[in-house]
Image (cartoon, helix red, strand yellow):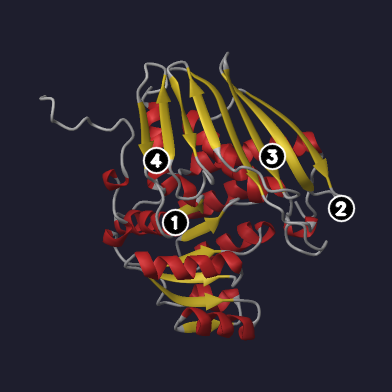
Amino acid sequence: MTATDPVAPLLAPAAAYPDPAEAPGLRWGILAAGGIAHRFATEIPRHTASTIAAVGSRSLDRARAFAREMDVARAYGSYEELVADPGLDAIYIASPHSEHRDHALLALQAGKPVLVEKAFARSAAEAREVFAAAQSRGLFAMEAMWSRFLPHYRSVVAAVRGGLLGEIVAINAQHGQHLVFGPEHRLWNPRLAGGALLDLAVYPLSFAHALLGKPDEIHAFGSLTDRGVDSAETIVLRHGPVTLTVAQASMLTGMANAATISGTDGRIDIERTFYNPSDAVLTLHDGRTERLAGRHAGGFQYEAAEVARRIAAGETQSPLMTWQDTMEVMEIMDEVRRRLGVAFPGE
């Protein structure tokens, strides 16, 4: 190497990962026409070869309004009609957490692969039912933990797993938003599996899991509303003798929503917001520093492209978000709920 040769980056740039626009196209059906469904319907046709071919809602009027707004060809007034549509290649489950298991099973029983919004279900037991149904039918199923597919996230995970930071000593990650709504809102309603854990804390917990896998020990502290859903929590995970993760979430206040991974050889700071397309800064104890440019438009296109690639290859799960990954994160959250005293009606 000469003095003018470029130094290879320590963190893999976005170009190291597949372009979502180059993935095979799928004809998606969206089950439930809420806010997150609008984002999916915006970003997938904008950034991939896939299309949103149909939407289903319990209200035909609502489905038709969504279809007009998002330029979707077909609207259905029931989920049963949606999953029976022969012109669909996959179903995106965008309903509340409380309905994920039943709606995923409905789609799988109709022979449709599924991408299920995070958190994948209310509990590990429900997630296990869905994966068993997918396995028995040879169908693809995946949790829509979209952050795991973003280039900056994959780059950081690869660097940590590759030992760039040495032995990991601490992980700190937050997800707090000011989401104070009425008691019937899905986030505050126990019947809809509301609370900060399944909606917000799942991000830092899945992040820690992507880096280190299943923890050896779980502790949790938090606050509950008068209806019994968690409004905020601090979760401590222990991996091995020295590694601790502190994951915080809150529906009561906005937080920095950044993440830091500290090891014996240095640290990586992911800027606000770590679970969105973000920049990351590497600082090593030997004096080397590096900034990874991770900001870009959209974000959901990466998970959708991964689904398309795996379905085209005849696979039933993705190595980036395996069934075991989802199960282990669900098991962590089950234990957190047990420690906080959160239970949902109908479990």
Side (left or right) of 153 relative to 25: right
The CA distance from mark 4 to mark 1 is 13 Å
Which residue was labeled with disc 4? 154
The local crowd at label 2, few if under 14, some if 14 to 19, many if 20 or more residues have their Cα within 10 Å, is: few
- Pointer 3 or 4: first along the chain: 4
Side (left or right) of 26 relative to 95: left
Q: Do the residues labelled 3 and 1 touch (CB within 8 Å)?
A: no
Viewer-nearest residue: 135 or 267:
267
Viewer-nearest residue: 325 or 174:
174
Amino acid type indicated by mark 2:
Arg
- Pointer 2 or 1: first along the chain: 2
Instruction: Tell me which residue sits at (76%, 63%) in the image.
Output: 185
Where does the image place residue 89, in percent across and percent down from the top left?
40, 68
The CA distance from mark 2 to mark 3 is 19 Å
> Which quadrant holds residue 208?
top right
- Pointer 3 or 1: first along the chain: 1
The CA distance from mark 4 to mark 2 is 38 Å
Instruction: Tell me which residue sits at (44%, 56%) in the image.
Output: 299
The local crowd at label 3, few if under 14, some if 14 to 19, many if 20 or more residues have their Cα within 10 Å, is: many
Marks 3 and 4: which is nearer the front?
4
Marks 2 and 3: which is nearer the front?
2
> Which quadrant holds residue 102?
bottom right
Q: Is residue 223 above or below residue 182?
A: above
Where does the image place residue 346, in percent across and percent down from the top left?
77, 55
The CA distance from mark 2 to mark 1 is 34 Å
The local crowd at label 4, few if under 14, some if 14 to 19, many if 20 or more residues have their Cα within 10 Å, is: many
Q: In this view, does 209 lie above or below 306?
A: above
- What number is the disc on residue 334? 3
Marks 4 and 2: which is nearer the front?
4
Side (left or right) of 14 relative to 165: left
Which residue was labeled with disc 1? 299
| Residue sitting farthest toward the left | 2
